[in-house]
Amino acid sequence: MTGGVHEDFDACYRAVQSRDARFDGWFFTAVSSTGIYCRPSCPALTPKAPNVRFFPSAAAAQLAGFRACKRCRPDASPGSPQWDVRADVVARAMRLINDGVVDREGVSGLAGRLGYSVRQLQRQMVAEVGAAPLAIARAQRAQTARLLIETTVLGFSQVAFASGFASIRQFNDTVRAVFGLTPTELRARARRGAAPAGDLPGSIQLRLPFRAPFHPESVFGHLVATAVPGVESWAGGAYRRTMQLPHGHGIVALVPRADHVGCSLLLSDLRDLGPAVARARWLLDLDADPVAVDGVLGADPALAPLVAKTPGRRIPRTVDGAELALRVVLGQQISTAAARTVTARAVRLLGEPLPLPDGELTHLFPPAARWASLDPAQAGVPRARAATLTALATALAAGELDLRPGADRDEALRGLAAIPGIGPWTLTTVAMRALGDPDVLPATDLGVVAAARAVGLALKGRLLAAHAESWRPWRSYATQYLWGALDHPINHLPGGRQ
Protein backbone atom coordinates (compact mmCIF):
# COMPACT_ATOMS: atom_id res chain seq x y z
CA MET A 1 0.00 0.00 0.00
CA THR A 2 1.14 3.56 -0.58
CA GLY A 3 0.83 6.88 1.19
CA GLY A 4 -2.73 8.18 1.60
CA VAL A 5 -4.19 4.71 2.21
CA HIS A 6 -6.54 6.14 4.85
CA GLU A 7 -8.35 7.99 2.06
CA ASP A 8 -9.61 4.72 0.51
CA PHE A 9 -12.55 4.12 2.82
CA ASP A 10 -13.69 0.82 1.29
CA ALA A 11 -10.21 -0.77 1.43
CA CYS A 12 -9.68 0.39 5.01
CA TYR A 13 -13.10 -0.82 6.13
CA ARG A 14 -12.46 -4.27 4.60
CA ALA A 15 -9.19 -4.44 6.55
CA VAL A 16 -11.09 -3.59 9.75
CA GLN A 17 -13.79 -6.18 9.02
CA SER A 18 -11.14 -8.87 8.58
CA ARG A 19 -9.08 -7.58 11.55
CA ASP A 20 -6.03 -7.62 9.29
CA ALA A 21 -2.95 -6.97 11.43
CA ARG A 22 -0.86 -6.23 8.32
CA PHE A 23 -2.37 -2.76 8.25
CA ASP A 24 -1.68 -1.87 11.89
CA GLY A 25 0.25 1.39 11.81
CA TRP A 26 -0.74 2.14 8.21
CA PHE A 27 -3.91 3.87 9.37
CA PHE A 28 -6.10 4.23 12.46
CA THR A 29 -9.83 3.65 12.84
CA ALA A 30 -11.89 6.17 14.83
CA VAL A 31 -15.48 5.50 15.89
CA SER A 32 -17.66 8.58 16.41
CA SER A 33 -20.23 6.77 18.56
CA THR A 34 -17.61 5.82 21.18
CA GLY A 35 -14.97 8.54 20.77
CA ILE A 36 -12.28 5.85 20.53
CA TYR A 37 -9.63 5.13 17.91
CA CYS A 38 -8.21 1.65 17.27
CA ARG A 39 -5.74 -0.27 15.15
CA PRO A 40 -7.33 -2.16 12.19
CA SER A 41 -6.85 -5.53 13.91
CA CYS A 42 -8.78 -4.55 17.06
CA PRO A 43 -10.76 -7.61 18.26
CA ALA A 44 -13.82 -5.53 19.21
CA LEU A 45 -17.02 -5.76 17.18
CA THR A 46 -16.68 -4.07 13.80
CA PRO A 47 -18.24 -0.60 14.04
CA LYS A 48 -20.95 0.47 11.60
CA ALA A 49 -19.51 2.16 8.53
CA PRO A 50 -21.36 5.50 9.03
CA ASN A 51 -19.68 5.86 12.44
CA VAL A 52 -16.14 5.27 11.16
CA ARG A 53 -13.40 7.70 10.20
CA PHE A 54 -9.87 6.79 9.16
CA PHE A 55 -6.74 8.74 10.08
CA PRO A 56 -3.14 8.47 8.81
CA SER A 57 -1.63 8.73 12.31
CA ALA A 58 -2.47 8.38 15.99
CA ALA A 59 -1.69 12.09 16.38
CA ALA A 60 -4.34 13.00 13.80
CA ALA A 61 -6.94 10.88 15.61
CA GLN A 62 -6.02 12.49 18.92
CA LEU A 63 -6.29 15.97 17.43
CA ALA A 64 -9.81 15.12 16.28
CA GLY A 65 -10.75 14.35 19.89
CA PHE A 66 -10.53 10.55 19.93
CA ARG A 67 -8.81 8.58 22.69
CA ALA A 68 -6.86 5.34 22.37
CA CYS A 69 -8.67 2.01 22.69
CA LYS A 70 -7.80 0.29 25.97
CA ARG A 71 -8.16 -3.11 24.37
CA CYS A 72 -6.02 -3.01 21.22
CA ARG A 73 -3.64 -0.21 22.32
CA PRO A 74 -3.24 1.46 18.91
CA ASP A 75 -0.44 3.66 20.23
CA ALA A 76 1.70 0.51 20.57
CA SER A 77 1.21 -0.75 17.00
CA PRO A 78 4.16 -1.01 14.59
CA GLY A 79 5.07 2.24 12.86
CA SER A 80 4.04 2.89 9.29
CA PRO A 81 6.60 1.31 6.94
CA GLN A 82 6.40 4.26 4.57
CA TRP A 83 8.42 6.49 6.92
CA ASP A 84 11.35 4.07 6.67
CA VAL A 85 11.02 3.43 2.93
CA ARG A 86 10.42 6.94 1.66
CA ALA A 87 13.18 9.54 1.35
CA ASP A 88 11.07 12.72 1.05
CA VAL A 89 10.93 15.50 3.63
CA VAL A 90 7.84 14.16 5.46
CA ALA A 91 9.41 10.72 5.93
CA ARG A 92 12.67 12.30 7.08
CA ALA A 93 10.74 14.48 9.52
CA MET A 94 8.93 11.46 10.95
CA ARG A 95 12.22 9.64 11.55
CA LEU A 96 13.63 12.70 13.30
CA ILE A 97 10.52 13.13 15.46
CA ASN A 98 10.75 9.46 16.46
CA ASP A 99 14.34 10.13 17.49
CA GLY A 100 13.17 12.92 19.80
CA VAL A 101 14.43 15.94 17.84
CA VAL A 102 11.31 18.04 18.52
CA ASP A 103 11.63 17.43 22.27
CA ARG A 104 15.29 18.47 22.21
CA GLU A 105 15.36 21.21 19.58
CA GLY A 106 11.75 22.26 19.02
CA VAL A 107 9.89 22.47 15.70
CA SER A 108 12.26 25.19 14.51
CA GLY A 109 15.21 22.83 15.09
CA LEU A 110 13.45 20.08 13.15
CA ALA A 111 12.71 22.42 10.24
CA GLY A 112 16.28 23.70 10.26
CA ARG A 113 17.69 20.18 9.98
CA LEU A 114 15.48 19.57 6.96
CA GLY A 115 16.20 22.91 5.28
CA TYR A 116 12.57 24.10 5.38
CA SER A 117 10.76 26.92 7.12
CA VAL A 118 8.49 25.96 10.01
CA ARG A 119 5.42 26.97 7.99
CA GLN A 120 6.45 24.91 4.95
CA LEU A 121 7.14 21.85 7.08
CA GLN A 122 3.90 22.11 9.03
CA ARG A 123 1.89 22.42 5.82
CA GLN A 124 3.42 19.27 4.37
CA MET A 125 3.07 17.29 7.61
CA VAL A 126 -0.59 18.18 8.04
CA ALA A 127 -1.31 17.27 4.42
CA GLU A 128 0.27 13.80 4.69
CA VAL A 129 0.16 12.80 8.36
CA GLY A 130 -2.89 14.77 9.44
CA ALA A 131 -1.00 16.57 12.20
CA ALA A 132 1.77 19.11 12.65
CA PRO A 133 5.15 18.11 14.11
CA LEU A 134 4.28 19.27 17.63
CA ALA A 135 1.13 17.12 17.71
CA ILE A 136 3.06 14.09 16.46
CA ALA A 137 5.71 14.66 19.13
CA ARG A 138 2.92 14.96 21.73
CA ALA A 139 1.58 11.54 20.69
CA GLN A 140 5.10 10.17 20.98
CA ARG A 141 5.44 11.64 24.48
CA ALA A 142 2.17 10.02 25.49
CA GLN A 143 3.40 6.60 24.37
CA THR A 144 6.71 7.10 26.20
CA ALA A 145 4.81 8.13 29.33
CA ARG A 146 2.64 5.04 29.10
CA LEU A 147 5.69 2.79 28.91
CA LEU A 148 7.22 4.42 31.98
CA ILE A 149 3.95 4.36 33.91
CA GLU A 150 3.38 0.67 33.18
CA THR A 151 6.91 -0.72 33.39
CA THR A 152 8.59 1.27 36.17
CA VAL A 153 7.87 2.40 39.72
CA LEU A 154 9.02 5.95 39.02
CA GLY A 155 7.03 8.80 40.54
CA PHE A 156 4.75 10.54 38.08
CA SER A 157 6.75 13.77 38.21
CA GLN A 158 9.81 11.79 37.07
CA VAL A 159 7.76 10.09 34.36
CA ALA A 160 6.44 13.43 33.13
CA PHE A 161 9.82 15.07 32.63
CA ALA A 162 11.48 11.89 31.33
CA SER A 163 8.74 11.72 28.68
CA GLY A 164 9.39 15.26 27.51
CA PHE A 165 6.45 17.08 29.09
CA ALA A 166 7.05 20.63 30.28
CA SER A 167 4.85 20.33 33.37
CA ILE A 168 2.97 17.84 35.53
CA ARG A 169 -0.32 19.40 34.47
CA GLN A 170 0.48 18.95 30.78
CA PHE A 171 1.45 15.33 31.48
CA ASN A 172 -1.77 14.59 33.40
CA ASP A 173 -3.99 16.28 30.82
CA THR A 174 -2.35 14.48 27.89
CA VAL A 175 -2.45 11.02 29.47
CA ARG A 176 -6.13 11.49 30.38
CA ALA A 177 -7.01 12.80 26.91
CA VAL A 178 -5.13 10.12 24.98
CA PHE A 179 -5.86 7.03 27.09
CA GLY A 180 -9.06 7.95 28.90
CA LEU A 181 -7.40 7.14 32.24
CA THR A 182 -5.40 9.08 34.78
CA PRO A 183 -1.76 8.07 35.30
CA THR A 184 -2.75 6.40 38.58
CA GLU A 185 -5.51 4.40 36.88
CA LEU A 186 -3.20 3.45 34.01
CA ARG A 187 -0.59 2.09 36.41
CA ALA A 188 -3.17 0.20 38.46
CA ARG A 189 -4.63 -1.36 35.31
CA ALA A 190 -1.16 -2.48 34.17
CA ARG A 191 -0.33 -3.99 37.57
CA ARG A 192 -3.55 -5.98 37.75
CA GLY A 193 -2.60 -9.63 37.28
CA ALA A 194 1.03 -8.77 36.47
CA ALA A 195 4.25 -9.21 38.38
CA PRO A 196 5.49 -6.05 40.11
CA ALA A 197 7.90 -3.98 38.05
CA GLY A 198 11.54 -3.96 39.01
CA ASP A 199 12.90 -0.94 40.81
CA LEU A 200 16.34 -0.79 39.21
CA PRO A 201 16.78 2.86 38.16
CA GLY A 202 16.60 3.29 34.40
CA SER A 203 15.57 -0.35 33.80
CA ILE A 204 12.62 -0.85 31.44
CA GLN A 205 11.06 -3.99 29.95
CA LEU A 206 8.83 -3.79 26.88
CA ARG A 207 7.61 -5.64 23.80
CA LEU A 208 8.46 -4.48 20.30
CA PRO A 209 5.68 -5.44 17.85
CA PHE A 210 6.27 -6.29 14.19
CA ARG A 211 4.29 -7.23 11.12
CA ALA A 212 4.31 -10.95 10.45
CA PRO A 213 6.01 -12.83 9.03
CA PHE A 214 9.32 -12.10 10.74
CA HIS A 215 12.42 -14.23 10.17
CA PRO A 216 14.75 -13.40 13.07
CA GLU A 217 17.57 -15.80 12.28
CA SER A 218 19.13 -13.68 9.56
CA VAL A 219 18.90 -10.26 11.20
CA PHE A 220 20.03 -11.47 14.63
CA GLY A 221 22.57 -13.82 13.07
CA HIS A 222 24.10 -10.97 11.09
CA LEU A 223 24.31 -8.69 14.13
CA VAL A 224 25.92 -11.38 16.28
CA ALA A 225 28.33 -12.63 13.58
CA THR A 226 29.67 -9.09 13.10
CA ALA A 227 29.44 -8.02 16.77
CA VAL A 228 32.30 -5.89 18.10
CA PRO A 229 33.60 -7.29 21.42
CA GLY A 230 33.12 -4.79 24.21
CA VAL A 231 30.26 -3.02 22.39
CA GLU A 232 28.04 -5.99 21.44
CA SER A 233 27.46 -9.52 22.71
CA TRP A 234 25.15 -12.53 22.56
CA ALA A 235 24.26 -13.85 26.01
CA GLY A 236 21.31 -15.75 27.42
CA GLY A 237 19.51 -15.81 24.08
CA ALA A 238 19.70 -12.02 23.73
CA TYR A 239 21.61 -9.70 21.45
CA ARG A 240 22.98 -6.96 23.68
CA ARG A 241 24.81 -3.74 22.90
CA THR A 242 25.75 -0.34 24.26
CA MET A 243 24.33 2.84 22.75
CA GLN A 244 25.31 6.49 22.90
CA LEU A 245 22.03 8.43 23.20
CA PRO A 246 21.19 12.16 23.14
CA HIS A 247 21.25 12.61 26.93
CA GLY A 248 23.47 9.75 28.07
CA HIS A 249 24.20 6.12 27.33
CA GLY A 250 22.21 2.91 27.44
CA ILE A 251 22.33 -0.86 27.10
CA VAL A 252 19.70 -2.67 25.07
CA ALA A 253 18.99 -6.42 25.10
CA LEU A 254 16.80 -7.83 22.31
CA VAL A 255 15.27 -11.32 22.32
CA PRO A 256 13.31 -12.74 19.35
CA ARG A 257 9.92 -14.17 20.30
CA ALA A 258 7.13 -15.74 18.28
CA ASP A 259 4.93 -12.62 18.15
CA HIS A 260 7.23 -9.80 19.29
CA VAL A 261 10.79 -8.90 20.17
CA GLY A 262 11.49 -8.67 23.87
CA CYS A 263 13.38 -5.50 24.71
CA SER A 264 15.19 -4.65 27.94
CA LEU A 265 16.65 -1.18 28.31
CA LEU A 266 19.02 0.17 30.93
CA LEU A 267 19.30 3.95 30.51
CA SER A 268 21.49 6.46 32.30
CA ASP A 269 18.85 9.13 31.51
CA LEU A 270 15.19 8.19 31.07
CA ARG A 271 14.64 11.07 28.66
CA ASP A 272 16.33 8.79 26.13
CA LEU A 273 13.58 6.15 26.23
CA GLY A 274 11.86 7.32 23.03
CA PRO A 275 15.05 7.53 20.95
CA ALA A 276 16.29 4.20 22.38
CA VAL A 277 13.09 2.41 21.35
CA ALA A 278 13.12 4.05 17.91
CA ARG A 279 16.74 3.00 17.34
CA ALA A 280 16.07 -0.57 18.47
CA ARG A 281 13.16 -0.83 16.04
CA TRP A 282 15.28 0.67 13.25
CA LEU A 283 18.13 -1.74 14.03
CA LEU A 284 15.88 -4.77 13.48
CA ASP A 285 13.80 -3.19 10.67
CA LEU A 286 10.62 -3.94 12.63
CA ASP A 287 8.39 -1.45 10.79
CA ALA A 288 8.87 -3.21 7.44
CA ASP A 289 5.94 -4.50 5.39
CA PRO A 290 7.05 -8.09 4.63
CA VAL A 291 3.92 -8.95 2.66
CA ALA A 292 4.60 -6.18 0.14
CA VAL A 293 8.30 -7.09 -0.07
CA ASP A 294 7.79 -10.82 -0.44
CA GLY A 295 5.00 -10.33 -2.96
CA VAL A 296 7.37 -8.61 -5.38
CA LEU A 297 10.43 -10.78 -4.79
CA GLY A 298 8.48 -14.03 -4.75
CA ALA A 299 7.32 -13.34 -8.30
CA ASP A 300 10.86 -14.01 -9.58
CA PRO A 301 11.30 -17.79 -10.12
CA ALA A 302 14.92 -17.55 -8.95
CA LEU A 303 13.99 -15.93 -5.62
CA ALA A 304 10.63 -17.64 -5.07
CA PRO A 305 12.06 -20.73 -3.28
CA LEU A 306 14.12 -18.51 -0.95
CA VAL A 307 11.10 -16.35 -0.11
CA ALA A 308 8.90 -19.39 0.47
CA LYS A 309 11.49 -21.00 2.75
CA THR A 310 12.16 -18.01 5.03
CA PRO A 311 9.54 -15.30 4.49
CA GLY A 312 9.80 -12.03 6.35
CA ARG A 313 13.53 -11.35 6.15
CA ARG A 314 14.61 -7.97 7.47
CA ILE A 315 17.63 -5.74 6.89
CA PRO A 316 20.12 -5.65 9.79
CA ARG A 317 20.58 -1.93 10.28
CA THR A 318 22.35 0.09 12.96
CA VAL A 319 21.66 2.25 16.01
CA ASP A 320 24.05 4.91 14.70
CA GLY A 321 24.76 5.75 11.07
CA ALA A 322 28.22 7.18 11.72
CA GLU A 323 29.21 4.05 13.63
CA LEU A 324 28.10 1.82 10.77
CA ALA A 325 30.03 3.82 8.17
CA LEU A 326 33.23 3.77 10.23
CA ARG A 327 32.89 0.03 10.84
CA VAL A 328 32.29 -0.69 7.17
CA VAL A 329 35.39 1.26 6.12
CA LEU A 330 37.48 -0.34 8.86
CA GLY A 331 36.42 -3.81 7.68
CA GLN A 332 37.06 -3.28 3.98
CA GLN A 333 38.85 -6.14 2.22
CA ILE A 334 39.26 -8.29 5.35
CA SER A 335 37.26 -11.19 6.80
CA THR A 336 34.39 -10.75 9.24
CA ALA A 337 36.50 -12.18 12.07
CA ALA A 338 39.42 -9.87 11.28
CA ALA A 339 37.09 -6.87 11.12
CA ARG A 340 35.74 -7.69 14.59
CA THR A 341 39.28 -7.94 15.98
CA VAL A 342 40.49 -4.68 14.43
CA THR A 343 37.35 -2.77 15.43
CA ALA A 344 37.51 -4.09 19.01
CA ARG A 345 41.12 -2.90 19.23
CA ALA A 346 40.10 0.58 18.02
CA VAL A 347 37.22 0.66 20.50
CA ARG A 348 39.61 -0.06 23.38
CA LEU A 349 41.91 2.72 22.18
CA LEU A 350 39.28 5.38 21.46
CA GLY A 351 36.03 4.35 23.11
CA GLU A 352 34.63 5.58 26.41
CA PRO A 353 34.55 2.82 29.07
CA LEU A 354 31.18 2.20 30.70
CA PRO A 355 31.07 3.50 34.29
CA LEU A 356 29.93 0.00 35.28
CA PRO A 357 30.80 -2.77 32.78
CA ASP A 358 27.88 -5.12 32.15
CA GLY A 359 29.15 -8.61 31.43
CA GLU A 360 31.02 -8.52 28.13
CA LEU A 361 29.86 -4.96 27.44
CA THR A 362 32.62 -2.59 28.49
CA HIS A 363 32.71 0.39 26.08
CA LEU A 364 30.65 2.81 24.05
CA PHE A 365 31.53 2.98 20.36
CA PRO A 366 33.88 5.96 19.86
CA PRO A 367 32.31 9.16 18.49
CA ALA A 368 33.48 10.29 15.06
CA ALA A 369 35.71 13.06 16.43
CA ARG A 370 37.95 10.55 18.19
CA TRP A 371 38.62 8.48 15.07
CA ALA A 372 40.70 11.29 13.57
CA SER A 373 43.35 10.52 16.21
CA LEU A 374 43.56 6.81 15.42
CA ASP A 375 47.17 5.57 15.28
CA PRO A 376 47.36 3.09 12.34
CA ALA A 377 50.25 1.20 13.95
CA GLN A 378 48.45 0.71 17.27
CA ALA A 379 45.18 -0.25 15.64
CA GLY A 380 46.75 -2.54 13.05
CA VAL A 381 45.17 -0.66 10.14
CA PRO A 382 46.90 -0.03 6.79
CA ARG A 383 47.81 3.63 6.34
CA ALA A 384 45.61 4.07 3.27
CA ARG A 385 42.56 2.81 5.15
CA ALA A 386 43.50 4.95 8.16
CA ALA A 387 43.54 7.98 5.86
CA THR A 388 40.04 7.12 4.63
CA LEU A 389 38.85 6.69 8.23
CA THR A 390 40.33 10.03 9.21
CA ALA A 391 38.67 11.82 6.28
CA LEU A 392 35.33 10.13 7.03
CA ALA A 393 35.53 10.89 10.76
CA THR A 394 36.47 14.52 10.10
CA ALA A 395 33.50 15.00 7.75
CA LEU A 396 31.12 13.38 10.25
CA ALA A 397 32.43 15.35 13.24
CA ALA A 398 32.26 18.65 11.35
CA GLY A 399 28.68 18.03 10.26
CA GLU A 400 29.69 18.03 6.60
CA LEU A 401 28.35 14.48 6.30
CA ASP A 402 25.05 13.55 7.98
CA LEU A 403 24.12 9.90 8.53
CA ARG A 404 21.69 10.51 11.41
CA PRO A 405 17.96 9.67 11.34
CA GLY A 406 16.30 11.93 8.80
CA ALA A 407 19.43 12.46 6.71
CA ASP A 408 19.00 13.22 3.02
CA ARG A 409 20.06 9.94 1.40
CA ASP A 410 21.25 11.36 -1.90
CA GLU A 411 23.22 14.13 -0.24
CA ALA A 412 24.79 11.71 2.22
CA LEU A 413 25.88 9.31 -0.52
CA ARG A 414 27.38 12.14 -2.57
CA GLY A 415 29.37 13.20 0.49
CA LEU A 416 30.57 9.65 1.09
CA ALA A 417 31.54 9.12 -2.54
CA ALA A 418 33.74 12.22 -2.42
CA ILE A 419 35.98 10.67 0.24
CA PRO A 420 39.03 8.88 -1.23
CA GLY A 421 38.97 5.16 -0.51
CA ILE A 422 35.18 4.78 -0.40
CA GLY A 423 33.88 2.78 -3.33
CA PRO A 424 30.58 1.34 -4.60
CA TRP A 425 30.44 -1.59 -2.14
CA THR A 426 30.81 0.72 0.86
CA LEU A 427 28.24 3.13 -0.56
CA THR A 428 25.59 0.43 -1.06
CA THR A 429 26.23 -1.05 2.39
CA VAL A 430 25.87 2.33 4.10
CA ALA A 431 22.81 3.18 2.00
CA MET A 432 21.15 -0.10 2.96
CA ARG A 433 22.06 -0.40 6.63
CA ALA A 434 22.63 3.16 7.86
CA LEU A 435 20.29 5.19 5.66
CA GLY A 436 17.56 2.56 5.32
CA ASP A 437 17.35 2.62 1.52
CA PRO A 438 15.15 -0.38 0.59
CA ASP A 439 16.29 -0.46 -3.02
CA VAL A 440 20.05 -0.94 -3.38
CA LEU A 441 21.89 -4.01 -4.64
CA PRO A 442 25.64 -4.59 -4.18
CA ALA A 443 25.84 -6.36 -7.53
CA THR A 444 29.61 -6.89 -7.26
CA ASP A 445 29.54 -8.29 -3.71
CA LEU A 446 31.15 -11.75 -3.79
CA GLY A 447 28.44 -13.20 -1.54
CA VAL A 448 25.66 -11.81 -3.73
CA VAL A 449 27.33 -13.10 -6.90
CA ALA A 450 27.89 -16.57 -5.38
CA ALA A 451 24.31 -16.73 -4.09
CA ALA A 452 22.90 -15.61 -7.44
CA ARG A 453 24.82 -18.43 -9.12
CA ALA A 454 23.50 -20.89 -6.51
CA VAL A 455 19.88 -19.99 -7.30
CA GLY A 456 20.39 -20.26 -11.07
CA LEU A 457 21.31 -16.68 -11.90
CA ALA A 458 24.77 -17.02 -13.47
CA LEU A 459 25.05 -13.25 -13.64
CA LYS A 460 27.17 -10.59 -12.03
CA GLY A 461 27.83 -6.89 -12.27
CA ARG A 462 25.72 -5.08 -14.85
CA LEU A 463 23.91 -8.23 -15.99
CA LEU A 464 22.81 -9.03 -12.44
CA ALA A 465 21.81 -5.40 -11.91
CA ALA A 466 19.73 -5.51 -15.10
CA HIS A 467 17.92 -8.66 -13.97
CA ALA A 468 17.31 -7.07 -10.56
CA GLU A 469 15.27 -4.24 -12.07
CA SER A 470 12.21 -6.46 -11.54
CA TRP A 471 12.99 -6.53 -7.79
CA ARG A 472 12.42 -2.78 -7.40
CA PRO A 473 11.70 -1.15 -5.00
CA TRP A 474 12.95 -3.95 -2.70
CA ARG A 475 16.45 -4.79 -3.96
CA SER A 476 17.94 -4.37 -0.46
CA TYR A 477 15.63 -7.13 0.74
CA ALA A 478 16.52 -9.24 -2.29
CA THR A 479 20.13 -8.93 -1.11
CA GLN A 480 19.12 -10.40 2.25
CA TYR A 481 17.43 -13.34 0.54
CA LEU A 482 20.47 -13.95 -1.65
CA TRP A 483 22.82 -13.88 1.33
CA GLY A 484 20.41 -16.29 3.00
CA ALA A 485 21.16 -18.88 0.33
CA LEU A 486 24.73 -19.20 1.62
CA ASP A 487 25.98 -21.30 4.52
CA HIS A 488 27.33 -18.47 6.63
CA PRO A 489 27.06 -17.54 10.34
CA ILE A 490 25.10 -14.40 9.47
CA ASN A 491 22.16 -16.63 8.57
CA HIS A 492 21.89 -18.48 11.89
CA LEU A 493 20.53 -17.45 15.26
CA PRO A 494 23.11 -18.61 17.84
CA GLY A 495 21.67 -21.42 19.92
CA GLY A 496 18.38 -21.44 18.03
CA ARG A 497 15.26 -19.35 18.56
CA GLN A 498 14.26 -18.68 22.14
Image (cartoon, rainbow, N blue to C red):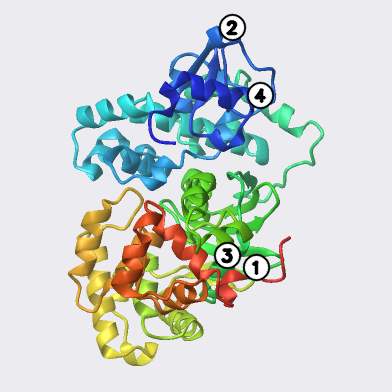
Residue type, mark 3 in image:
Ser
Question: Sequence-wise, which precedes: disc 1 or disc 3?
Answer: 3
The residue shown at (37%, 53%) is 472
Question: Sequence-wise, which precedes: disc 4 or disc 3?
Answer: 4
Mark nearest the camera among 2 and 3 is 3
**3D distance between C-alphas at marks 4 and 1:** 35 Å
Q: Nearer the viewer, residue 273 or 439?
A: 439
**3D distance between C-alphas at marks 2 and 4:** 16 Å
Question: Sequence-wise, which precedes: disc 4 or disc 1?
Answer: 4
**3D distance between C-alphas at marks 2 and 3:** 45 Å
Question: Sequence-wise, which precedes: disc 2 or disc 4?
Answer: 2
The image shows residue 182 at horizontal and vertical percentages of: 62, 21
Relative to residue 156, is residue 483 depicted above or below?
A: below
From the image, which quarter does the C terminus lie in? bottom right
Residue type, mark 4 in image:
Lys
**Residue at the disc numbered 3:** 218
How many numbered callouts? 4
The image shows residue 112 at horizontal and vertical percentages of: 22, 41
Relative to residue 10, is residue 374 depicted above or below?
A: below
**3D distance between C-alphas at marks 2 and 1:** 48 Å
Mark 2 lies on a secondary structure that is: loop
**3D distance between C-alphas at marks 1 and 3:** 7 Å
Q: Tell me the quarter of the picture where residue 186 sits.
A: top right
Q: Find residue 307 and name its label.
A: none
Q: Find residue 70 and name its label.
A: 4
**Residue at the disc numbered 2:** 33
